[in-house]
């Protein structure tokens, strides 16, 4: 059992949960654990999942044709956004922002939008390399 302080996110037959102990969990609708990633995700950010068709080429078993390869993003109070493969929980990247992240991310068209305790809203292109750029500013 784990303590959960953020909303879960669903896609197809999967549920993604960020626990207060810092783990990201993926379970099926019956509650059976698909995978667990110990990732130091301390905070109150709910997992975000991009469910727009055709974002990437990876096929994710159990999601159906409408869910092409997914990325799960979760913010943490240490000022980071962590990205994981929705298929198996593999850590893909960690992005450092200018302050603590208590907000939940939103992902659309390969971009993460999230508010940060440095009083900025960031729009992060997860398909491109480079540092996070605050929304409304130039690189």
Image (cartoon, grey):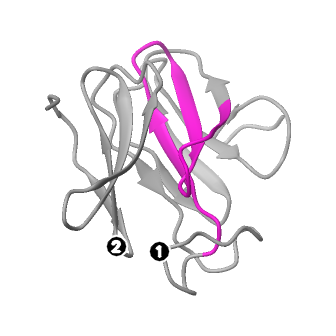
Quick check: 110 above or below 88? below
**Quadrant location of the N terminus in the rendered image:** top left
The location of residue 61, given as percent across then percent down, is 55, 72
Mark 2 surroundings within 10 Å by alpha-carbon count, few (fewer than 14), some (14 through 19), many (20 or more): few
Residue at figure coordinates x 27%, y 30% from the top left = 44
Decide which of 69, 55 is in the foreground and name it: 69
Where residue 70 sits, quadrant-wise, is bottom right
SS at circle 1? loop
The location of residue 63, given as percent across then percent down, is 48, 75
Quick check: 111 above or below 46? below
- The residue to which callout 1 is attached is 62
Residue 94 in the magenta stretch? The answer is no
Sooner in the amino-acid sequence: mark 2 or mark 1: 2
Residue at figure coordinates x 31%, y 23% from the top left = 43
Mark 1 surroundings within 10 Å by alpha-carbon count, few (fewer than 14), some (14 through 19), many (20 or more): few
Q: Are marks 2 and 1 in contact (CB under 8 Å)?
A: yes
Residue 76 in the magenta stretch? The answer is yes
Residue at figure coordinates x 42%, y 23% from the top left = 76
SS at circle 2? loop
- The residue to which callout 2 is attached is 13
Where residue 124 sits, quadrant-wise, is top right
Decide which of 112, 117 is in the foreground and name it: 112
Magenta span covers which residues?
68-93
Residue at figure coordinates x 44%, y 51% from the top left = 48
Decide which of 114, 9 is in the foreground and name it: 9
């Amino acid at each position: 059992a784990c303590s959960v302080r953020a909303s879960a996110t669903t896609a197809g037959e999967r549920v993604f949960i960020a626990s207060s102990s810092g783990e990201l969990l993926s379970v099926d609708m019956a509650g059976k654990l698909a995978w667990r990633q110990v990732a130091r995700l301390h905070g109150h950010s709910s997992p975000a999942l991009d469910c727009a068709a055709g974002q990437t080429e990876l096929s994710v078993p159990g999601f159906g044709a409408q869910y092409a390869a997914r990325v799960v993003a979760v913010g943490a109070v240490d000022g980071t956004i962590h990205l994981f493969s929705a298929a198996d929980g593999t850590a893909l990247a960690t992005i450092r922002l200018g302050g603590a992240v208590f907000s939940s991310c939103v992902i659309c068209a390969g971009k993460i939008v999230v508010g940060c305790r440095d009083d900025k809203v960031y729009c992060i292109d997860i398909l491109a390399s480079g540092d996070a750029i605050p929304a409304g500013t130039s690189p």
